[in-house]
Amino acid sequence: MVIDCFAFFKEMKNKMYSKIDTKIIEELGAIVGQTNVQTTKDILKAYGHDETEDFVFLPEVVVIPNTVGEVSKIMRLCNQQKIPVTPRGAGTGLAGGALPVCGGILLSMERFNKILNIDEQNLQITTETAVITEVLQNAVKEKGLYYPPDPASKGTCYIGGNINTNSGGPHAVKYGVVKDYVLNLEVVLPNGEVIWTGANTLKNSTGYNLTQLMVGSEGTLGIVTKAVLKLIPQPSQSLLLLIPFESPESACAAVSAIFRAGITPSCLEFMERRAIEYALVYLGDMKMMIPDEVQAHLLLEVDGYYIESLYEDCEQIAKVVEGFGAEEILFADNDAQKRELWRLRKCVGRAVKKGTIYKEEDTVVPRAELPKLLKGVKMIGQNYGFESVCYGHAGDGNLHVNIVKGELTEQQWNEELPKAITEIFELVKSLGGTISGEHGIGWVQRPYMPIVFGEVELGLMSAIKNVFDPNNILNPQKIF
Ligand code: 2HG
Ligand code: ZN
């Protein structure tokens, strides 16, 4: 679905924003070099989407800067001329955060791709923000160090995008999410000012925390150009278990019991049967016999330094899950088996989306509420007649719900489904949860923010946006 711009945005744009004319194009070329200013339709389309459904919004121009000074000059120009700017990393976002919904400039950060320093004494890394997450992880692993946050898209996503959505991934359950590793950020503000938000310290109680305010701000408060991140020592051992259950709800109930037994897995993922079935079809080269009675699996990893204690943990876990009807546990104790199981888990999102019209929800609740959440999602699906495929980071209480259009009519999909999603989010809220655990709000989840925030809270967020970006030129129409 190629949307040049909704009529509403066009009308609003005419009111609020200036059109980009040849003079502006020349000024941009003078800043970044004419070859880094692109206006051909194929380029505009290539940069006009991320991984959110099939949305494509055409920017008026794609600009690819190479230095913080260039970003600063571009923002100063756009702030003066009231031109909207959408910053984009690798475009792996799942909530439309990088969609240029108001046209204007699509600012691609792809050339900010250098690791600047790995400080082995202080266990810190200073990096530009278009470094691929897995590239950064491998660079520090060579020095025996570990940067744990590992979104499923870690092989393509940029660290800058992870910072802007406060990403998580399977290892967050033991090691925390991106915000737990961000110490200091170099940021270009909408008016072109360049700031550093914090200090390269593990502790910091110095005024308001501008660093944490930037983390998760989805490119709406400033453009992150450099980051100083905390590292930890790399664990040397890990074991991976695939635990089958007859009942998805029992699998979810076992999750909090494992923690109450005193075990903190390094990963604890849930996959209902349909999720694995989609993944096996998508991969095509993996054989896995799932007995008919098995309707869900937990994929559980324990890691550390002493293999014996990991085997003891696994014995304890086996006892706990047995009480929830777990069947025979698969032990993956060699790297090849581990790689295969992670390959299966990490492709679920892509597998469900391939060839289906879908909507993706990133629900998160207190861990022990997962069984009620899952039951509620399935009931709402029955009421509205849609298939949902549920999987995700059960250890964090973070359940990804991929809703598949299937046989629904256009009318049901466009008018009834938002009501169903509202019911899912109201259930999440009633369980003490919220509407995004790691994917962010971006463009697609905006309508649901009032379910979890009142006018005062949303008013505070808008006021903060207004302090940073009074002309509303940076990533407009996101979050609110
Ligand atoms: C995951 O945990 C990702 O697999 C979702 O957060 C991936 O939807 C996707 O593509
Ligand atoms: Zn996820």
Image (cartoon, grey):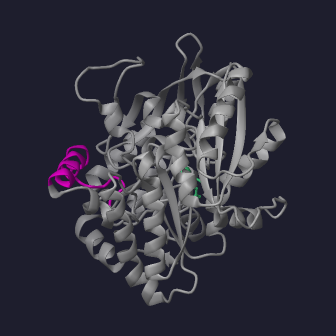
Is 122 drawn above or below residue 271 in the view shown? above
Residue 442 relative to residue 392: left or right = left
Q: Quadrant of residue 130?
A: top right
Is 387 drawn above or below residue 226 in the view shown? below
Query: Residue 135, position in %: x, y?
Result: 66, 36
The residue located at (59%, 52%) in the rendering is 270
Asked whether residue 96 appears in the rendered view, the answer is no
Query: Residue 256, position in %: x, y?
Result: 49, 43
Q: Considering the image in quadrants, where does the C terminus appear?
A: bottom left
Q: Quadrant of residue 267?
A: top right
The span shown in magenta is: 456-476
The residue located at (58%, 53%) in the rendering is 251
Asked whether residue 260 appears in the rendered view, the answer is yes
Is 19 drawn above or below residue 32 in the view shown? below
Query: Residue 230, position in %: x, y?
Result: 50, 24
Residue 78 relative to residue 136: left or right = left
User: Residue 56: within the magenta?
Assistant: no
The residue located at (65%, 25%) in the rendering is 140
Query: Residue 159, position in %: x, y?
Result: 54, 39
Residue 425 relative to residue 453: left or right = right
Q: Quadrant of ligand 1?
A: bottom right
Is 244 drawn above or below residue 416 in the view shown? above
Q: Quadrant of residue 286?
A: bottom right
State whether the magenta stretch is mostly helix, strand or loop: helix
Residue found at the very far left of the displayed protein:
456
